[in-house]
Image: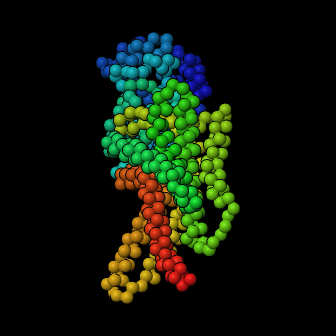
Amino acid sequence: MEREIIHDLMKNCQNRNLTEYNLKKLSINIFNFSDEALTMSGGLTAMKMEAPQLPTKNSSFIPEIWMPLDALHKIPAERRVVALVSYMNHSQFQFNEEQISSMVLRIELLEQRYMQDLTQSITMIFQIEEMDSRLSNNSKLQCRYFNEQGLEKHSEYWKTDGCEATVNKTTVTCKCNHATPFAVLLIRDPIAEIHWMILSYISYIGCGLSAFFCALSFLIYIFGKKNKMDFSMSIHVSLSGALFLLNSTFLLTEWGATVELSWVCEFVAAFMHYSLLCSFTWMAIEAFHLYLLLVKVFNTYYKYYLLKLSAVGWGVPGLIVAVSLGVKDFKQLYGAKELTMLDSNQTSAICWIIDDSFFYSLNLVYFILIFIFNSGILMAVGSSICRMNMLVKSPGKCQADQQRFNASCRSGLTLLGLTCLLGTTWGLAFLGSGYVNYPVLYLFCILNSLQGFFIFMWICFTAKRQRKRQMEEKLTSTPMRTSALKSE
């Protein structure tokens, strides 16, 4: 609608050299270039144009624009009308986490095709106020254009294709080979491409290993007769099953985006979302069961305990995803989501949630609640373990020190295992948000992609302890039975 209004004004000004309009939210300068005006350029390769003055800004804030003459010559004389648009505020162009650091300038033609893929670029010189105070080690200024097609496709809104920036102490010079809305944005430094590749390899290898060991945990549970009677083991294996689905689906996200049938990518995205919610839910169930075992120490019987936990662990995420799929006719939530490397402009697509507001409002709140609950349980268990270690008594000082050291090592390994079991390592995402922190990113990828493997090791150690305890019970009960037979 805005473009139609601008074009109507441009068509009414085809017989005037310069026309100015000051509307409520924007100002427009419309130029009509005649052949005589182009020939009187004095041998210059570009013609200077004045952007509209804004009442709330001083003249130093208005950029300096140079239009290439060869591009203007190619436009037919009757269509050689160019409009420069300045906006009172740029709230309509503000999306996600971009920080617009200049005025937004729109360059509009009656036929935009005459200003696409130019051999000589359009030059815009922006004056940036207080530039040095806003720059930091992990941010930089970039020239970007507004991708109006992104409004319909929910893809990237501000892009850098065809634009180059030269930054000095007082100005930012933008050179772009097309005519669209432009601005200077303050951008956080992206992940370097080499780190992105390494993190991707770590994620894929870790997810592959986790999927394999999660499947192995399930087989051990199926063929173990006594495992099915142990609620803790059943909950561990259920969490392993959720992680198996998550890791397996993650390996298919890029493939699903390349399939022509759109429903394939939607199914992969929805199933991955379901697997992620199941994993979070079973982590919360692990914490709840741990609370019953170690904190609420007295025996409590719950009828159909495991069945109720399974209904929550698998049913609640299924209900959420079913409702999300049910609103497809009103709003598309799943599909192919484009990811762009800011330093190389390379794009790739994965099957995932395409609506950012839905992603953050649901997943983030869901995980924060579980993370707070699990962290509280972990701290309670950790304090209980510390109190038990303080009560360790031995006859000799050296023996007591050695015993306390061994107990501390076992306690540390136990807490590390519980940290992976309860999924509190996912909290590293909070430390890595807002800026690029490579140590946190590597820890996040390693610990969470290998979570299935760590749980498999926990299951193996748990089964080993159970067998050892059963052997000790048999050894202690055998002499008692023998003495009883002799007395009889």
Seen from this angle, which residue lies furthest bottom? 395
Task: Locate residue 369: give its quadrant.
Answer: bottom right
Lateral position of residue 167 relative to residue 245, left or right: left
Q: Name which residue lies at 56% across and 55% down.
A: 282
Lateral position of residue 74 relative to residue 285, left or right: left
Residue 188 drawn above or below residue 288? above
Task: Locate residue 179: give its quadrant.
Answer: top left
Where is residue 425 shown, x and y percent of the image?
46, 57
**Image quadrant containing the N terminus:** top right
Where is residue 144 shown, x and y percent of the image?
42, 35
Where is residue 186 shown, x and y percent of the image?
42, 44
Residue 316 drawn above or below residue 3? below
Seen from this angle, which residue lies furthest right? 303
Q: Name which residue lies at 33% across and 87% down.
A: 397
Front residue of 28 and 430? 430
Front residue of 137 and 408? 408
Where is residue 30 shown, x and y percent of the image?
51, 24
Front residue of 353 and 250? 250
Lateral position of residue 189 relative to residue 83, left or right: left
**Is any part of residue 214 visible from this angle?**
no
For the image, the number of numbered tags is 0
**Image quadrant containing the C terminus:** bottom right
**Is any part of residue 278 visible from this angle?**
yes
Q: Name which residue lies at 41% across and 17% down.
A: 72
